[in-house]
Structure formats: C-alpha cells, structure tokens
Image: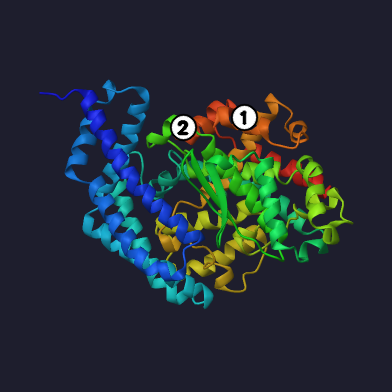
Amino acid sequence: MKRPISELIKNYQDKMQFARAFRYALWMIGWDTETEAPRGALEERSIHVGTLSRELHNFSTSQEMIDLVQELFDRKDELDSLMHTEIKKTHKYLMRQLKVPVDEYVEYQMLLSKTQTIWADAKNNNDYNAFKPYLEKIIFFKQKMMSYWQTDTLQGYDVLLDQFEEGMTSTEYDEFFVALKKDLVPFVKGITSLPKQEFSFLNQSYDIDKQKAFSHYIMDVLMFDRTRGLMKESEHPYTSGMTSQDVRWTNHFHEKLITSSIFSAIHELGHATYEQQCNPDLDKTNLGGGTSMAMHESQSRFYENIVGRSFAFWNVHFPKVQALFPSQLKDVTVEEWVKAVNQVENSLIRTEADELTYPLHIMVRYDIERAIMKQELTVEELPQEWNRLMKAYLDIDVPSDREGILQDVHWSSGMFGYFPTYALGSAYAAQIYYAMKRDFDVEDSLASGNTQAINEWLKQKIHWHGSTKTAKQLLLEATNEPFNPQYYIEYLKTKYQSIYR
Ligand code: ZN
C-alpha cells in the first residue's frame, strides 16, 4: 500500500533537518578555522571534521535516504511547487553522487587532500614539474567522472560546466568568448598603449584601524543588516551564508594597499546582500542562497564595479575616505580618485586584474580547460600554451610559471569548469544594470548616500527567489531578455572610453 505523501514529506524534512545540523556544525568550524582558530587547534579539529563529514556522507547516501528520495521523486506530481523543485534538486545531486563508485570517490578525495599543499609548494618554488604528475591524476579522475555523469544531452567538458552553472554549455560559452575576443582584445590594446598615469597617493601607508572603520562605514552604505551577519578578518576575503539569517564575510587589510580592502568590502557585501535578501521561507529547504556561481558573482561585481567604481558613488563617499586619511588624500580630487581606481593595465595575475582586462584572463583559462578535456592538450604542454595565450590576449610575456600556469588554486582542488563563471557573472551584471536603468535613475539614487533603491530592485528581481529558479530563468525574467553578451561589451566600452577619452 502506498504511504500518504504527507508522511513521506515529514520524514524527508526531519532527515534534512538532521543533515542541516551537521552542515551547520561543519560550516561553523570552517568559519572559525578561516578567521580565529589558533594554529594549535587545527590538528585535532581535522579529526572532528573527518568524523562529522563521514557521518553526514553515510547518512545522505544511506539506502533509506535513497529510497525515500526516489519515492518522492516518482510521486513529484503530488507535491506543491516548492517541494517539487526541492525534490528534483535533491534527486539530481543524489543520483550524481551514486554514479561514482565509492572506492573511486574516496581515492579522489584522498588525492585532493594532498594536492592543494603540493600545488602551494610548487607555486612558491616556481616548480611546475613538482605539480605536474598530480595535476595529471586530477585530470584523469575528472575525465572518469565526466563519463559517469554524462547524459544524452550533456557530454564532455559540458558535464563539468553544468555543475557550476546549470544549463551553460561550451557552445554558449564559445559564443560569449568569441564576442569578447573580437571586441575587447583590440579595445584593450588601444587603451594599454596609452602612456600610463601615476597615482602616487595609492602607494602610501594607510592606517589599518582606519581602513577597518571605512569597511564598517561601507557596510552601512550598502545597508548590510548587522543583526543577521558580521565581518571578521581572514587571509583572503570571502563570504559565507548558511541561511538568510546568518551571513558572514571577511576582509583583509594591507597597510600599503588601501584599495584592496575597500573594493574587497564592496565585492563581498554584494555576495552578502544576495544571501541576506533571500526569502527566509527558503532557509529550511535546499533552495535558499544564490542560484549559481555566475549569478552570485554578478551580484558582487555589480556592487564592486558598477556601483563601487562609479563617479556617482565616490562623489558622495570620497569625502569620508579623505576625512579618515587627510595627510594622504587632502590634495586628491574625486575625479583623480575615480580615475585611479579604474586604471587599466596588462597584468600577469588574474586576482589583481582590473575590470576591463579581467575577462581576458578568464579566456586563457577557458581555452586551456576545454582543450584539456577534449584531450587536445597534455599537462606537459600547459605552461607553453598558457604563455602563448597571455601574449595573444593580453600582449604580455610571462616570466615564470609562478606568475603563469601555477597562479590559481582551482585546478589543484579539481575545480575544472569554474573559471568561466567569473566572466559570465560580470556579463550578467552588465545586462542587469541596463535593465535596472530602464526602471529608475541609478546614478541619481546613489546621490542619496546609500544603495536602498538598488538593493530593493535586486531583491525583487533576483535575491528573493534564492535558487528556486536557474540563473538563465532569473536573468530572462529580470531583464526581459535571454543572456546577451553585447550589454557587457557596450558597458565596458562606454565606461572606459569616457575614462580614457
Ligand atoms: Zn566573488
């Protein structure tokens, strides 16, 4: 006899609550590790993390759980629309997990537990050969997983792309990057051939406590709700939200680099605002939080670049920075400041790249990943190919692998397919900006001193929906158009033509 659907739902929700409690504990430990835990605590806690993770994995993939999710999935037409969406998502992840033989999964996890350290050492020693055999093993595993996860419609590299950005395939990414290549590469060359302007005020020392005070000021400008979140310090800035009621972010302060903490704050607060403005009803489902990597990144980049590097924004807030740092900035005009924080430069390191050249760094990685996964490129050939593409796209010679192929952590933790979401996020942000401008005067609203109108628009169109819709769906509904890379190209050209005349 069939069990009543309400009984199945209750059972499922109890199990999810149990798993959530484990996840919360792991999240809390992770947050503490990144921010405040003393080094002495790390060894013992890694044992606790191992125990909790194993329990959670066993619980989530137990036969009882599989049967329950399968039954709910088979009877999904009896569910309300939210539960329907949730079960489809749970089922998809569970099935994906079960396709990988347990022994292989464990072997892969053990490999990954070593490779980040090996990569970090190889990078420090500028020794690609030390990392190469491990990278080869990671790629070997990735190719096996691709074969387990492939479907009739999803094959090869597309399988990996889909995990970070549901529904985005290499065909669509190819179109996007071809458009960028055609317009941006010559445009960037034109700008970088101009004589470089020096802004010596950027290289002075800035008191760290005052930089922190400015981060707190920015939190108020962007209207971060401190009753449901907080900021601490970590090595690399990041944001992590468990629910809409508990959203945490970090910053890192460099005495000699004031722009770093300012733009990291605005960037991370973009991520945090997305998390805080999700419908709280989704907190007890698996549909809370941002819907995809690119959509999340679109929000952080919207605040960082479109809001945070605009004249309208600094016209209101530059006097505050000036008041905190009178000796460094008293003779600097707001026009000079805005020009300084929008300087374009061909650089070697992705994470330090400016807004305009950033997508070219991503194109290098995308081309390489695609070629690796198509087996057109061996690990032996990677450094050379990297250097060739950097010359072609950014017109720059790479002096060492440390500043080339070894610079990013992603591949050492198996994250193939992640990079293109960074560029896609910036392009989403531009399309969203043009849609927003049709509804109200964005620059005008920034003169009010906070981002209330912007937050509200993004809340209604994007944030509130959590991950109940895919990024593609959300973008279509928010902007009345499918993804169109021309907005991004137009946005960049208009902005930098006006800055560089
Ligand atoms: Zn980000």
- Residue 304 spot, x, y in % from top left: 66, 46
Establish if 288 lies above or below 319. Answer: above
Q: What residue do we see at 42% from left, 61% from top?
A: 413
Residue underneath mark 2: 280
Residue underneath mark 1: 456
Q: Secondary structure at mark 2?
A: helix
Q: How was the colour assigned to the protein in this rendering?
A: rainbow
- Residue 452 spot, x, y in % from top left: 67, 32
Looking at the image, which is closer to me, 99 or 25?
A: 25
Tell me which amino acid carries mark 1.
Glu
Left or right for 433, reference 5: right
Instruction: Report which quarter residue 314 is drawn in.
Output: top right
Establish if 168 lies above or below 50. Answer: above
Left or right for 339, reference 128: right
Q: Residue furthest right?
A: 331
- Residue 37 spot, x, y in % from top left: 46, 63
Tell me the distance, in whole angstroms, between the alpha carbons under discs 2 and 1.
Answer: 16 Å
The answer to whether the residue labelled 2 contacts the one labelled 1, judged by CB atoms less than 8 Å apart, is no
Left or right for 62, reference 222: left
- Residue 217 spot, x, y in % from top left: 70, 47
In this rendering, does residue 195 appear at all?
Answer: no
Left or right for 84, reference 263: left
Tell me which amino acid carries mark 2.
Pro
